[in-house]
Image (cartoon, rainbow, N blue to C red):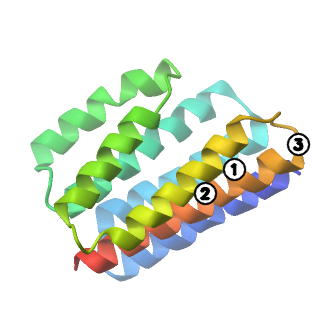
Amino acid sequence: MKRAEVLSNLAYLVAGLFMLHVGHYIVAIALVALSVTSSLYHLTHYRDWRIADRYFVVGTVLAVMYELGMLSPISGSLLALLAIYPAVALMPLDPFVIAGVGLSAGYIWPKSWLPLGLMMLAGYCASRAERVDHLTTEYQVFHSLWHVLTALAVIVTLLVAS
């Protein structure tokens, strides 16, 4: 069933290709990198791929903030460098993701109600997945929904902000 987690990472690839098509190049690169690293982590469960996966989760949030105009190239680069430590230390990333999504939603409010709702639903799915054994179907389904819903939320965030 681990195949579901690997296949659901295609949502990041599709989102990345769509972002490339509409001109959001930084987010496109982050999403494609997230698709690759997350797929490789879920396929192999190697620590190095887990670190890369986690780094590009934060990297994607920072890329969205940059594309929205919230970060300059310098501040975005500094935050990206700072994101290396929590990724390598395998710290929980929820606070970083929540802060970035919350700031982004506030920045484009009231247009952000739909992407914010998608992220809240994705957060529920992630929370539900983390409460059960990772080998169960329930985990695979809810973690896969996290992949799909967060990819969709990135697309919708940048579309409604335009």
Give the residue type at disc 1.
His
User: Would you identify the image quadrant in which residue 145 lies?
Assistant: bottom right
| Image mark for residue 136 | 3
Q: Is residue 103 visible?
A: yes
Give the residue type at disc 2.
His
User: Would you identify the image quadrant in which residue 40 lies?
Assistant: top right
In the figure, 142 relative to 158: above or below? above
| SS type, badge 3 | loop
The reply to whether the C-beta atoms of the residues labelled 2 and 1 are less than 8 Å apart is yes
The reply to whether the C-beta atoms of the residues labelled 3 and 1 are less than 8 Å apart is no
Q: Which residue is mark 2?
A: 147
Q: Which residue is mark 1?
A: 143
| Number of residues whose C-alpha sits closer than 10 Å to that of mark 2, classed few (under 14), some (14–19) or many (20 or more) | many
Q: In this image, 29 relative to 160: left or right? A: right
Q: Is residue 62 visible?
A: no
Marks 3 and 1, how far apart at CA = 11 Å
Give the residue type at disc 3.
Thr
Q: Residue at x 31, y 46 (%)?
A: 100
| Image mark for residue 156 | none
Quick one: quadrant of the C terminus? Answer: bottom left
| Number of residues whose C-alpha sits closer than 10 Å to that of mark 1, classed few (under 14), some (14–19) or many (20 or more) | many
User: Of all residues shown, which one is farthest toward the top?
Assistant: 89
x and y, in percent, of residue 61 in the image: 36, 50
x and y, in percent, of residue 30 in the image: 41, 55
Marks 2 and 1, how far apart at CA = 7 Å
| SS type, badge 1 | helix
x and y, in percent, of residue 95 in the image: 39, 33
x and y, in percent, of residue 19 in the image: 39, 74
Q: Residue at x 11, y 42 (%)?
A: 74
Q: Residue at x 50, y 70 (%)?
A: 152
